[in-house]
Image: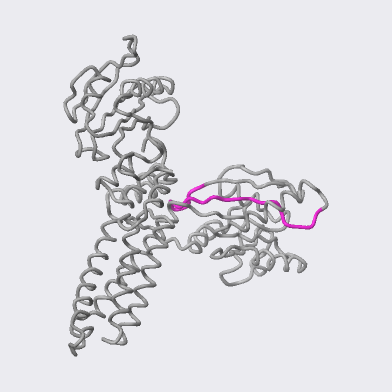
Amino acid sequence: MLTMGPASRKIPIVAIATAPGKAGVGVVRISGEGLQELAIAITNKRLQPRKATLVDLRNQDGQIIDSCLAIYFLGPHSFTGEDVLELQCHGGPQLLDLVVRRCLQLGYSAGLAIAEPGEFSLRAFLNGKIDLAQAEAIADLIDAQSHAAVMGAARSLQGAFSEDIHRIVQALTQLRILVESTLDFPEEEIEFLENAHARQQLTEIQEHLQRLLATAKQGQILRDGVQLVLVGAPNVGKSSLLNCLAGEEIAIVTAVPGTTRDRVKLSITLDGVPLHIIDTAGLRQTDDEVEAMGIERTWASIRTADLLLFIEAPGAASAEEPLSAEVTAALPVGCTVLRLVNKADLLSAAEKATGSEPLYVSAKTGAGIAELKNAILSRIGWRAGQEDVLISRQRHIDCLMHAEAALNKAGLYALQGNRALELFAEELRLAQEQLGQITGRLLPDDLLGKIFSQFCIGK
């Protein structure tokens, strides 16, 4: 885990800032205080800040390692807020490793060390260049699984999410000032809550927070995706449905029950939402040891599902009905079941039940698949056509929900008038504290270190 002490932050750090593997260009980044002399030692030139300069990097014997572009950023006008040297080299892994080793040799006396994962972003946060929500957006931008996720992470990185949090915090601060200034004069008999329109201010804050929470939940769906598990008895067409959703032959399909003996995983995007689909072994009693192992993995998938598609065949036998209850009992909290009947092409229109569920689809003909996709998005709470989604994490959702709960309590105390002003003020403080944790202003150092250690090296 990253250390947060001031001494460790003064040590200059170096790392390859581009992804592992071969590429046309690879970047080596160095950050620290007062890097001018080290930059001269590495490049044999005095670099002008923010100007790309062609330099030859040489080993200790004077042989050229690579000719590259060097850019020097003088702190605090850099990503980290410190002096930063970036070497844009050719992108061979062995070449970049040689460049890093040479930098370490030349920077030995200055204490130059290999950066830990996320340490560049951590220094940018600690030096006030970005807040924690923006720092997390850097990692989310790299890990984005869809075009919509890229755009959402970019908006968060530019500070749109943080600005929303800041506006709510400002409104809370103003309300707290009014409340706590009134607490200093308890002998006053004026009904503060009425005269200061405190209830109205609280309502406006609550409404703003609710809108932000709804947007954040959408952002979490974009960031993490949804684990969609296909479950049912053997030979109901789970693998055919997987292939239909994927648009290609991913899973083996035969008329023999029990063909799928292990989980088949596939990731697709639906309206920009990443769906991680798991096709499972059919649930039934079996003496086949291999099939039994596959069925056990089916139950493991069920226990981690976000949405479960329980698939039945036309005219499913009544003996299978208890299976549905058993599946429902194994679901994690928050997971819902969407029931559908596959092979609907074998049924007449009169045989199909009316109503919204079960859905009738045919993986063979494609009938009902568009309706199924819409139903999936509806069940996970996705609102189609959004352009202002901000990428969010479960940590953000938890903080927003705790803040919402505190404001709801404050609303109850507000109904009691001046008699409950102290309790009213305390709930406002708790709500503001939760919001401060999102941007990192009130987060413990050990948790900050844990968050940044999940970043990739060089970021």
Vertical comparison of 354 with 435: above or below: below
User: Along the line of sight, which residue is nearer the eye, 112 or 122?
Assistant: 112
Residue in the image at 27% along x and 40% along y? 80
Does 456 appear above or below 232?
above
Q: Residue furthest bottom?
A: 189
Q: Quadrant of residue 90?
A: top left
Question: Residue at point 35% right, 64% down?
Answer: 434
Give the left or right position of residue 167, taking residue 102 as reference.
left
Q: Position of residue 451 (x, y in %)?
A: 41, 49
Magenta region includes residue 269:
yes
Residue 161 sits in quarter: bottom left
> Which residue occupies 17% across, 29% down?
49
Q: How many marks?
A: 0
Left or right: residue 71 compared with residue 146: left
- Position above or below: 458 against 143: above
> Residue 113 versus residue 212: which sits nearer the camera?
113
Q: Is residue 346 magenta?
A: no
- Residue at x-position 26% and y-position 29%: 85
Q: Which residues are magenta?
A: 268-286
The percent position of residue 144, horizontal first and vertical second, equals 42, 45
Residue reaching furthest to the right:
287
Instruction: Looking at the picture, tell me which residue is in the foreground, 152 or 159.
Output: 159
